[in-house]
Image (tube, grey):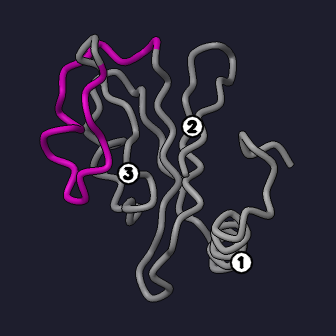
Amino acid sequence: MTTEETVDGSAVQDSNATRVHPSRPRGYVTIFGTWCKGCGICIEFCPQAVFEANGQGRAVIVHGNRCTACHWCDIHCPDMAITVRRLEPEELEELQELAELAEQGALPAGGDL
């Protein structure tokens, strides 16, 4: 389940609520779409293949649940269009609970809570 929300008209966040492996670090990735010029560095070098190119060649988050908060992408982004925040254990537990509720069909369509 992927939810994209726009902040300031240019930020696209990925709040994937999918199964989370409890023993590995987890990150929350944000791409500011209007800042990205489509260099492809993050797509090519992300060790977890979190990104893919959209129809315009710009990076989009397609597997946000894979992010391990290694910060490779936000450190190397020449446009400073990417931010990564490491999720705390409590946040991971909440994501797991939301994923279970989504599987049961207990969440409203579109992720509106």
Q: CA distance from mark 2 to mark 3?
A: 12 Å
Instruction: Classify 10 Å Cα crowding around label 2: few (below 14), some (14-19), many (20 and above).
Output: many
Residue located beneath label 2 in the image: 13
Q: Residues within 10 Å of mark 3 (few under 14, many from 20)?
A: some
Residue at position x 40%, y 39% from top? 61
Contact, mark 2 vs mark 1 (Cβ under 8 Å)? no
Residue furthest out toward the bottom: 23
Determine which quarter of the picture holds residue 2: top right
Is 107 in front, or is 88?
107
Relative to 95, does residue 44 appear above or below in the rendering? Answer: above
Residue type, numbered disc 1: Glu
Q: State the SS at label 3.
A: loop
Which residue sits at x=34%, y=61%? 70
Is label 1 in a helix, a strand or a loop? helix
On residue 78, the disc is none
Give the residues drawn in magenta, as a range. 34-54
Question: Within 10 angstroms of label 1, few (less than 14), some, or many (20 or more) residues?
Answer: few
Image x and y of residue 28, in percent: 53, 53
Q: CA distance from mark 2 to mark 1?
A: 20 Å
Residue 6 shown left or right of residue 81 in the figure: right
The amino acid pointed to by label 3 is His
Mark before the other along the chain sequence, 2 or 1: 2
Q: Quadrant of residue 71?
A: bottom left
Residue marked by disc 1: 90
Residue 107, given in percent of the width and then of the height, sits at: 79, 57
> In the rendered structure, does residue 112 fall within the stretch colored magenta?
no
In this picture, residue 104 sits left or right of residue 4: right
Most distant residue in the right direction: 113
